[in-house]
Image (cartoon, grey):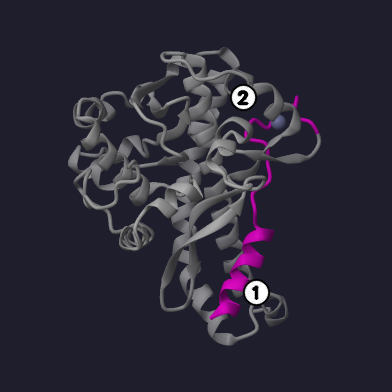
């Protein structure tokens, strides 16, 4: 079992997407490790002795396991998605200054980085699956054996890769259009092309999120129009001072679709908002960090509940309600 996970991790590492999200003639040489969640201001608050907690998947042939793991602050939430020039230049307004309400440039930049991180994850996953398919198709035992020494792992992976590859390719193709649109808006400073609904919780919760996702079954409920394709929601959460900032961003052209955020999230009571956000994070988010202090303050029973609910997310058991589980409040 461990061998399968080791093989997957090695192949995944070699398939990482390393390209600047802007990718134009201004790019400097080399792609750096960029933090999707701001390191000095945000991750520092959440870490204890340089360590942060994240929930991680580990894959075995029979199931997917979820475990809370320690990650070093230096590498937590990093991705190779920008060249040094663009990483240093684009994000000054969010890296150097605290967030202020209604600052369209900052809200745009949070959404932009969150999208870039998820784009990088999806493109890396597509690369990984493509690599696996081509290794399998070549029938080159020599090459595959570099990663997987047992035939069970090889066939498991090959069998599961092709359909998944096609799925990811479709997502990345659609995300490419959004990427072009975001880069155009950035260049023209058309920050109002992104709309953000913001909630500020009146307490400092040691949790950070930077993740883009699509509310799968909410699409159906809202009569999802296939022609229009994926409508990404960019979610950014971080503590600031004695408060916690939640920024939910989407493209202006999807404003009507996302009108339910105002009615069904922003206008709710704080306690309901906490539950809705916890459910959204655990059902859809792949990049979130919790302070060890906060994680340890949860009872054993609650930690187990959170891990097992998060596991359902990885098995794509989506829901048509915003609160599916009222025992997984991450904001207490
Ligand atoms: Zn660049």
Q: Is residue 24 magenta?
A: yes
Question: At x 39% / y 36%, what residue is drawn?
Answer: 232
Give the residue at mark 1.
Answer: 138
Closer to the camera in the image, 29 or 52: 52
Question: At x 59% / y 53%, what residue is drawn?
Answer: 71
The image quadrant of residue 151 is: bottom right
Q: Pinpoint residue 7: horizontal percent, then vertical percent.
A: 62, 73
Closer to the camera in the image, 274 or 229: 274
Magenta residues span 1-28
Nearer to us of marks 2 and 1 is: 2
Is residue 33 among the parts visible in the rendering? yes
Q: Name, please, the residue furthest toward the bottom.
A: 151
Closer to the camera in the image, 77 or 188: 77
In the displayed structure, 115 sits above or below 281; it is: above
SS category of the residue bearing label 1: helix
Answer left or right for 278 relative to 26: left
Q: Pinpoint residue 210: horizontal percent, then vertical percent.
A: 48, 38
Give the residue at mark 2.
Answer: 95
Answer left or right for 21 relative to 102: right
């Amino acid at each position: 079992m461990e061998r399968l996970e080791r093989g997957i991790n090695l192949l995944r590492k070699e398939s990482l997407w390393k390209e600047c999200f802007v990718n134009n003639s201004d790019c400097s040489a080399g792609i750096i490790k960029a933090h999707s969640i701001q390191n000095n201001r945000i991750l520092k608050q959440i870490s204890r002795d340089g360590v942060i907690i994240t929930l991680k998947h580990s894959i075995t042939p029979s199931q997917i396991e979820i475990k809370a793991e320690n990650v070093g602050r230096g590498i937590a939430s990093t991705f190779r998605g920008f060249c040094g020039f663009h990483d240093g230049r684009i994000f000054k307004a969010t890296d150097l200054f605290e967030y202020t309400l209604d600052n369209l440039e900052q809200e745009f930049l949070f959404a932009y980085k969150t999208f870039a991180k998820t784009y990088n994850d999806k493109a890396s996953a597509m690369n990984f699956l493509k690599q696996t398919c081509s290794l399998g198709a070549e029938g080159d035992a020599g090459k595959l054996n570099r990663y997987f020494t047992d035939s069970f792992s090889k066939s498991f992976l090959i069998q599961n890769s092709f359909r998944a590859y096609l799925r990811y390719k479709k997502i990345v193709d659609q995300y490419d259009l959004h990427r072009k649109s975001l880069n155009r808006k950035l260049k023209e400073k058309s920050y109002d092309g992104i709309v953000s609904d913001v909630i500020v919780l009146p307490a400092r919760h040691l949790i950070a999120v930077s993740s883009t996702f699509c509310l799968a079954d909410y699409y159906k409920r809202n009569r999802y129009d296939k022609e229009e394709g994926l409508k990404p929601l960019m979610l950014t959460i971080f503590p600031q001072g004695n408060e916690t900032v939640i920024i939910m961003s989407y493209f202006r052209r999807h404003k009507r679709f996302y009108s339910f955020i105002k009615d069904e999230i922003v206008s709710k009571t704080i306690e309901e908002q906490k539950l809705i956000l916890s459910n959204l994070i655990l059902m859809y988010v792949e990049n979130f960090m919790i302070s060890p202090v906060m994680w340890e303050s949860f009872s054993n029973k609650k930690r187990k509940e959170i891990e097992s609910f998060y596991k359902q997310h990885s098995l794509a058991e989506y829901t048509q309600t915003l609160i599916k589980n009222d025992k997984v409040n991450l904001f207490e």
